[in-house]
Image (cartoon, grey):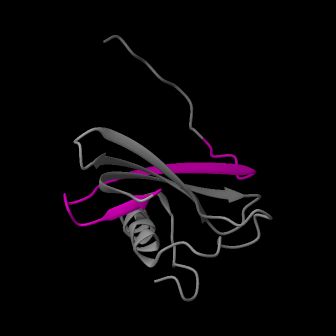
Amino acid sequence: MDLSATGEPVIVQEDTQVHVGIDLRPGSLTLTRNGEDLTAYHALVMFASAHGQPWAAQEVKFSARGSDGKVAALTVDLLSDTWDGPRPGIPAAVWKVVAHAATSAGDVGITYAAPPGQS
């Protein structure tokens, strides 16, 4: 591959997003959707920081397998409909996935703590 690059990239702090993917140990997280159990094996967590505000987790996209072995995708919106805090009713295990992703992304400056009562 022939590639060259010049310049010094600067992140625009108006609306910065970082996606962090983590692999999950098979069988360590089961998600239930419409009565169907799905075994998650990967999570992609989207973090955002708008206008220099602290980082917030916006959503998690899970890749999972059903009991029939078919691959399924499940997206969990983490912010409330008014975008001013965490969405109520998110299971604690999902917030633990978010915390794991944030820990693995520490080298890009993301610091994250689960919302109160969600860890």
Residue at far bottom of view: 117
What residue is shown at x 60% (from left), y 64% (from top)? 78
Which quadrant of the figure contains the N terminus?
Answer: top left
User: Relative to residue 87, is residue 64 depicted above or below?
Assistant: above
Q: Which residues are magenta?
A: 10-34
x%, y% of residue 67? 24, 50
Query: Which quadrant would residue 56 be assigned to in this image?
Result: bottom right
x%, y% of residue 77? 60, 58
Q: Is residue 72 magenta?
A: no
Query: Between residues 76 and 105, which one lies in front from this camera angle?
Result: 76
Question: Quick check: 48 left or right of 110?
Answer: right
Query: Between residues 93 and 109, which one lies in front from this camera angle?
Result: 93
x%, y% of residue 52? 72, 62
Question: Quick check: 77 left or right of 52?
Answer: left
Q: Is residue 21 magenta?
A: yes
Query: Between residues 15 and 23, which one lies in front from this camera angle?
Result: 23
